[in-house]
Image (spheres, helix red, strand yellow):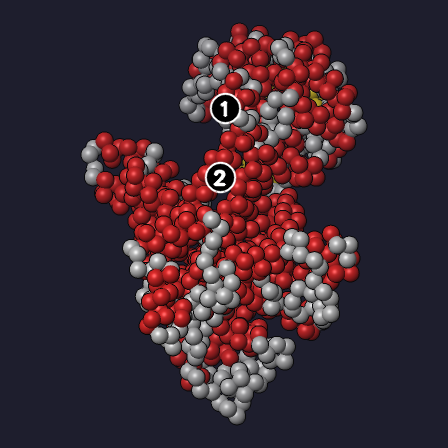
């Protein structure tokens, strides 16, 4: 599915201002997450203790996004929320992506009963809306951060299996694969050295989009109270907690909500730009 | 002499960024009423963009630069290309390379026919549309016109679809028909059959045709006159008999010697580029453009 | 047998198999997690004898495959067990809460189609001009924003700051629910001839349905746009233009129908995603639907109820896909007439 060389893709990517905006947003969010300790004004407010002399303050010069019900600086907590969300997304995808890709390779290349079993299994997983499956898994496990990540990981791999499976099915008919088969290349060599690199643009594009969507999923779980527990600063649970104080302390839920929007938007625009640049099917 | 199509000193450029890619460098050609004229050249020579300009569509796109004159059925398409809108499908129609992909896959032939009859906002009743469509399909020797009207394009063969396309092109009795590599996507014998059918019908109805092709031998039995185009310039112009008997321009000579003898869809072995192909236009006796002194 | 019917029966058979697969999956996940389900159900204060009795009653001492057998038998008899939270049969609970969710989702689905399709069509028709840029920007923002964020924003804007819509719930205080026939308040009110109740229910639906629909609208608009742009490149659109078909007519009919075929399948998935997002929106607007029940049973580790909720949602998802398949096969003559071609 990669019709273009990477330099052509880069030129095309650069010419689209929307994609550049996505890149800028992503770099901005990652930088905030990485340097949270240095840039946030009140790093101590990550924990359960705030400044009780400054509770429920509206946005001001001292607290740009206001303070919460126990006097913690909201900006600080949002920046740490970025860090947590990105970290969770990276962990979830660094397990589910390779698993999904390898299973997709096997299903697409080996065919037969391997294909049948794996693809029917993905059908079953994909027949349950992701959020509902993750919620159900959380129903059987204690609501902790690790379990929330586990639940999202368990439901995420089938998307990669299906994606890679489709690419492999298309590639397996290509001349270079047949040529390699004729000269007696081993199936493993074929799968990982010949076919896998051709899946890369589609997988990378999906990966970029998915960072945003995993953030969305995890924050949805926390919003329902099924994910990260206090006092860990999580964007989803901040929105949920803040909603109780609407409309007087509107900043409590609106700023974390906008923060989720910015984060997901950045990865989405970037992913879209990559998709167009690589011409990848996702 | 009345011309249904007249192009004079036409240039076309595509602007991209600050650069302009020049595609046509002063093309002149004409088609008189009822006349069959061929425009022959390899792909990229500018023949298809000429057809798009004659439709009045390409010059409305952003980034296209045209100079010169195009006059189609009395409209000046450089000054007012939008004037062509109500004439398309009526006074000027078109036939395509692959009839099956040129017919919308999710509509029945009858529905597309009705759309053609009503194009440009004309009012035609359901019954009248069906009757005219049936008659048009009978003219192109479709065995069961009623069944064809109720079919979808994918249910008919390529040859049948080409007949349908010809019927659609002629049903509104146009003055000019653009045939852009008609039926090149079809089987060789089917292409030949449908071309003969088209030839008979346009002769009978007195429709003028601009026949665009990459294949000289296909136009030989069809065209009255031939223009040969090479890289955006007309290089030779003559009556069909003159041109085939006595090809004078080096490019035409190369094209003729390379052309496969069979009428066919396969691209002929195109001649290698040579400086000689850049020699000026050769006009055969008695041909010239209207308003010019014949050479 | 007509090709459409045959296709549907095929899909139906596959769906039933997938649903059985889902039940196996969810059943086994529920059983392999640490902890004794009976102990979880009864809580830490129950005596060991009570726990043992429950284990016996629920066949928890049998091998897991046998347990699934019991579960499947009950499921086929329409019995999904008893909720420990409400002490009622799970099926009865679902019948109580589900119509509210379904009504919300159906209204949101209608909004998604009625607004998303025209927006995408407009963007495609004016590709790379301002309506396109605007539509793309709006749809990408809509897609990237979780439904609960929309809920919070809409609630703050149109229920608190500018209070033109109700804050929460399905009906205003003092308005009685119409006699339950379908469980959809708007429909039931109309059936009962209570116009006032109908408008009150509709009024309460607008904000939550919009919050739920927004990301679907964005997604639909994006898909329709790209599918239509692909269609605009087809030779038959070149033909339509060469024959002077009007641009509005091409956009509404000639390019629209062919491009709907690939779009619809994915629309089905989006619609199904709404079932999940309804959980988020219902929480914001205190909507008495499956979400309230679902979250409650999850927090209480009410295993039978959790399994029941997941199965119902998976079934809805499969039914949605069946309906989409049916619509696609009606629009696409290649499927509808597959047999006639073979004969010809």
Residue A84, by quadrant, is bottom left
> Which residue is depicted at the point 77% across and 21% down?
B127
Quadrant (top left/top right/bottom left/bottom right) for the N terminus of chain B? top right
> Which residue is depicted at the point 39% across and 73% down?
C43
Chain bearing mark 1: B
Contact check, label 1 and label 2, Cβ < 8 Å: no
Q: Position of residue B19 (x, y in %)?
A: 54, 44
Q: Are marks 1 and 2 on the same chain?
A: no
Q: Position of residue A99 (x, y in %)?
A: 31, 53
Chain bearing mark 2: C
Q: Position of residue C116 (x, y in %)?
A: 62, 50
Q: Which mark is residue C343?
A: none
Foreground: A50 or A265? A50
What residue would you read off at disc 2?
Answer: C12
With respect to residue C81, does B253 lie above or below? above
* Label total for image: 2
Could one spot residue C44 in this view of the protein?
Answer: yes
Foreground: C115 or C293? C293
| Mark 2 surroundings within 10 Å by alpha-carbon count, few (fewer than 14), some (14 through 19), many (20 or more) | some
Q: Secondary structure at mark 2?
A: helix
Could one spot residue B23 in this view of the protein?
Answer: no
Left or right of A14 in this view: B63: right
Q: Position of residue C186 (x, y in %)?
A: 70, 56
> Which residue is depicted at the point 55% across and 82% down?
A66
Distance CA(mark 1)–CA(mark 2): 54 Å
Left or right of A115 in this view: C128: right
With respect to residue A132, does A12 lie above or below? above
Left or right of B196 in this view: A152: left
What residue would you read off at disc 1?
Answer: B42
């Amino acid at each position: 599915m990669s019709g273009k060389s990477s330099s052509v893709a880069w030129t095309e990517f650069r010419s689209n201002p929307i994609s550049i905006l996505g890149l800028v947003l992503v770099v901005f969010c990652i930088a905030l997450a990485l340097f949270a300790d240095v840039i946030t004004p009140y790093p101590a407010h990550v924990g359960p203790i705030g400044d009780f002399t400054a509770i429920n303050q509206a946005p001001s010069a001292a607290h740009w996004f206001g303070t919460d019900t126990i006097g913690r600086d909201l900006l600080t907590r949002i920046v740490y929320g970025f860090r947590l969300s990105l970290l969770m997304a990276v962990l979830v995808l660094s397990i589910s992506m390779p698993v999904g890709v390898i299973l997709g390779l096997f299903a697409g290349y080996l065919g037969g009963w391997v294909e049948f079993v794996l693809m029917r299994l993905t059908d079953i997983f994909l027949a349950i809306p992701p959020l509902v499956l993750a919620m159900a898994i959380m129903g059987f496990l204690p609501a902790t951060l690790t379990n929330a990540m586990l639940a999202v990981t368990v439901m995420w791999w089938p998307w990669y299996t299906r994606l890679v499976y489709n690419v492999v099915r298309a590639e397996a008919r290509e001349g270079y694969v047949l040529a390699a088969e004729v000269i007696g290349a081993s199936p493993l060599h074929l799968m990982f050295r010949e076919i896998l690199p051709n899946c890369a643009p589609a997988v990378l594009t999906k990966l970029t989009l998915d960072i945003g969507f995993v953030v969305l999923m995890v924050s949805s779980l926390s919003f329902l109270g099924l994910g990260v527990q206090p006092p860990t600063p999580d964007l989803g649970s901040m929105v949920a907690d803040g909603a109780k104080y609407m409309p007087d302390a509107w900043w409590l839920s609106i700023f974390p909500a906008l923060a989720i929007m910015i984060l997901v938007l950045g990865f989405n625009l970037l992913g879209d730009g990559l998709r167009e640049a690589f011409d990848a099917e996702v | 002499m009345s011309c249904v199509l007249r192009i004079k000193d036409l240039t076309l450029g595509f602007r991209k960024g600050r650069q302009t890619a020049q595609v046509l460098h002063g093309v002149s050609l004409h088609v008189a009423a009822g006349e069959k004229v061929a425009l022959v050249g390899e792909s990229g020579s500018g023949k298809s963009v000429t057809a798009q300009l004659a439709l009045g569509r390409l010059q409305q796109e952003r980034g296209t630069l045209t100079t010169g004159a195009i006059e189609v059925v009395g409209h000046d398409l450089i000054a007012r290309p939008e004037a062509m809108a109500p004439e398309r499908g009526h006074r000027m129609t078109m036939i395509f390379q692959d009839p099956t992909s040129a017919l919308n896959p999710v509509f029945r032939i009858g529905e597309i026919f009705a759309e053609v009859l009503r194009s440009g906002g004309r009012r035609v009743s359901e019954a009248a549309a069906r009757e005219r469509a049936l008659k048009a399909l009978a003219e192109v020797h479709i065995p069961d016109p009623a069944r064809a009207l109720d079919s979808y394009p994918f249910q008919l063969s390529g040859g049948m679809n080409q007949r349908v396309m010809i019927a659609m092109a002629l049903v509104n009795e146009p003055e000019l028909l653009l045939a852009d590599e008609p039926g090149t996507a079809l089987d060789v014998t089917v292409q030949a059959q449908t071309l003969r059918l088209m030839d008979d019908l346009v002769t009978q109805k007195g429709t003028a045709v601009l026949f665009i092709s990459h294949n000289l031998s296909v136009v030989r039995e069809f065209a009255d006159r031939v223009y040969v185009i090479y890289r955006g310039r007309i290089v030779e112009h003559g009556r069909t008999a003159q041109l085939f008997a006595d090809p004078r321009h080096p490019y035409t000579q190369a094209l003729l010697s390379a052309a496969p003898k069979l009428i066919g869809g396969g691209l002929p072995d195109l001649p290698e580029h040579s400086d000689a192909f850049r020699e000026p236009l050769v006009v055969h006796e008695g041909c010239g453009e209207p308003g010019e002194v014949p050479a | 047998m007509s090709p459409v019917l045959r296709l549907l029966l095929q899909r139906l058979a596959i769906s039933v198999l997938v649903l059985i697969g889902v039940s196996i999956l969810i059943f086994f996940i529920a059983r392999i997690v640490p902890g004794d389900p009976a102990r979880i159900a009864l809580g830490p204060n129950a005596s060991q004898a009570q726990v043992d009795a429950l284990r016996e009653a629920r066949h928890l001492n049998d091998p897991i495959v046998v347990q699934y057998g019991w579960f499947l038998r009950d499921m086929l008899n329409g019995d999904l067990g008893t909720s420990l939270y409400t002490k009622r049969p799970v099926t009865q609970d679902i019948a109580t809460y589900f119509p509210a969710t379904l009504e919300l989702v159906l209204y949101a689905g209608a909004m998604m189609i009625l607004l998303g399709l025209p927006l995408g069509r407009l963007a495609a028709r004016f590709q790379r001009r301002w309506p396109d840029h605007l539509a793309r920007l709006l749809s990408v923002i809509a897609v990237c924003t979780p439904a609960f964020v929309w809920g919070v924003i809409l609630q703050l804007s149109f229920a608190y700051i500018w209070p033109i819509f109700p804050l929460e719930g399905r009906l205003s205080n003092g308005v009685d629910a119409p006699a339950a026939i379908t469980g959809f308040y708007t429909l039931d009110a109309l059936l009962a001839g209570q116009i006032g109740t109908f408008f009150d229910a509709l009024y309460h639906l607008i904000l939550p349905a919009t919050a739920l629909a927004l990301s679907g609208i964005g997604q639909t608009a994006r898909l329709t746009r790209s599918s239509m742009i692909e269609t605009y490149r087809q030779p038959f659109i070149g033909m339509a233009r060469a024959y002077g078909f009007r641009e509005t007519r091409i956009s509404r009919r000639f390019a629209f129908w062919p491009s709907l075929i690939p779009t619809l399948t994915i629309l089905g998935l989006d619609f199904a995603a709404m079932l999940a997002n309804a959980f988020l929106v219902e929480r914001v607007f205190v909507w008495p639907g499956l979400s309230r029940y679902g979250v409650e049973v999850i927090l209480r580790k009410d295993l039978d109820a959790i399994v029941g909720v997941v199965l119902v949602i998976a079934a809805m998802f499969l039914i949605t896909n069946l309906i989409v398949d049916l619509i696609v096969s009606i629009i696409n003559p290649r499927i509808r007439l597959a047999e006639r071609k073979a004969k010809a």
